[in-house]
Image (cartoon, rainbow, N blue to C red):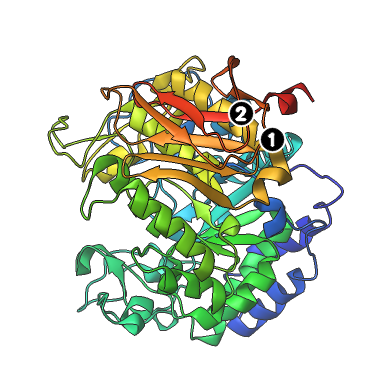
Amino acid sequence: MPTDGVRQPLQPLYLALRITFAKLLNGLVVLLLAIAIIFKPVSAATVEEWRTRTIYRLFIDRFGKEDDDINICLNLNDYCGGTFKGVIKRLDYIANMGFDAILINPVVQQYGRGYHGYWSQNLYEINPEFGGEEGFQALIDEVHRRDMFLMVDVVINHTGASNQTKEAPTGNITEHVPFGDPKYYHPFCMIDYTNQTSVEQCRLGNSEEESLPDLNTEDTFVAQTLINFIANFTSFWGIDGYRIDAAKHIRKNFYPTFVEAAGVFMSGEVYYFYDDEYQASYVIDAGLPAVENYNLWKYIQSVFTKQNPPQTFTTLDDLIHNQSSVYPNTNHLTTFIENMDIGRFLQTDIFGGTSDPGLTQDQAKYKNALTLLLTMPGIPMVYYGAEQGLYSRAGDVDSFRMELWYSLYDTTTDLYGWITQLVSLRRMYAGKLFDANLTTLFVEDDVYAYTRGLVLTVLSSEGYASQPRSIVIPNLPYAPGTVLARLDDWTATVVVPAAGGGLNVTINNGRPLVFFPLADLVR
């Protein structure tokens, strides 16, 4: 491992701990891990620092290989060959779009075919399939060298032990480190989603044979070990933030100490929509700095694809303004329009068709959704492959996580260019954008215009085949005579009319429009 001045003193202690974990009595393990908490990060990345960042979310196994092999992965249900060094090789591909943070899937050692990282087998080993400790350290160093933040997905709700049933619940739990005893898990039961206790203490999974052992965080050893783990992992590796997988499946009063021990920004996955109060409770009551805004995602998806229940820009606008009264600060929430669990925005049916009205491959709609994501309140997470227009097949989870290398990392695609422009605009305005609320100027069911700071965004949900649509936008926040540049073509300027006059704009082929003061570009 590199021996920079910050992390070098930790190496002997960390290596010694790893060697002795499996041998020492539980009480001694807890004591030794507690010692590691003394080593705190020199500079913890706070929510205030994260809220100005734009996150590129990727899967290690699917993003990049170390060599130039571009062959299609024949079994998406297993490892496909992506590694930490493969990511390093393409970091500039990400950075050149303007992203200043990346989120990677869990990196600890896995059971079996755990290419995704959600079946932990050993919390104290870095997955050798990804390149082990050496590769992970190299990735961290290269990310930080580019002044980017690194967020790591962590799983503390369950492990990946398998071969268990209700009749034989032990399976290969004994192989897990450090939770290799059935006593560290809740009794075997499958989740009843109408019961919060069951949500927290029973198993995720499609069936008893395909369920994930649920860690008993009410147990003192389990809770303290997880708390010590996150403190040590943060300080040793220099992690800037975490995504907490399956956050709603852990008791809320576990989180305050856990968050404090990590000392960095966290966003919890509370996979629940149409109930902002429930999601917000994990910020207000549990103390998580943020949650992933699943309710917003569901509305956005329905606006553009008309999935049930159907939504419009009118109902979406209501949601956005209502959320500002439910959450302490919607600028802190992590936002998205696609991920590895829900599939990609662009989708076909299982046979490759789009006859289902809830599925779309309309890139004009996609550009509008991406524009909304990158100009509205929240910390946006753009899923890898968005810039290449990757699509998935509805219901085929493996297709949600396609390999990227067959795209040849093309930087000339329309989407790569548009995302680059949007992210660059976010960075240009920094605090002026991120301190501002969204102000609605014009909204109809299929057209939406708003400002955030000095950025004017005009969206359409009608798609590429739509007819030209002209609207007049009132109540502009600019002085009369202000020249506005259009993001996709800075020479296509418009002038803010005299006081009381609205700005006339025309939407062509359903494409989004983004304007900003030309003088800001000159400065």
- Name which residue lies at 51% across and 25% down: 418
- Which numbered disc flags the more N-terminal residue, 1 or 2? 1
Q: How many labels, in total?
A: 2
> Where is residue 501 drawn, in percent x and y?
55, 34
Residue 114 against residue 177 in the figure, above or below: above
Query: For the residue labelled by badge 1, is the local secondary structure a helix, a strand or a loop?
Result: loop
Quarter of the picture containing the C terminus is top right
Residue located beneath label 1 in the image: 479
Q: Quadrant of residue 31?
A: bottom right
On screen, residue 42 above or below 352: below
Q: Position of residue 447 (x, y in %)?
A: 37, 38
Q: Nearer the viewer, residue 168 or 264?
A: 264
> Residue lying furthest right in this view?
5
Q: Is residue 178 visible?
A: no
> Does residue 68 appear to the left or right of 482 in the view shown?
left
Q: Quadrant of residue 194?
A: bottom left
- Foreground residue among 239 and 357: 357
| Residue 443: numbered disc | none
Quick check: can you spot residue 315? yes
Provide the residue designation for mark 2: 496
Q: Is residue 259 above or below residue 468?
A: below
Question: Type of residue at label 1?
Answer: Ala
In the rendered structure, the answer to whether residue 291 lies left or right of residue 208 reads: right
Indicate the amino acid at tag 2: Val
Image coordinates of residue 171 in percent, x first then y, are 30, 70
Badge 1, how many Cα within 10 Å: few under 14, some, many 20+? Answer: few
Alpha-carbon span between mark 1 and mark 2? 7 Å
Residue 477: image location, x then y, percent: 63, 41
Residue ID at (60%, 58%): 332
Q: Secondary structure at mark 2?
A: loop
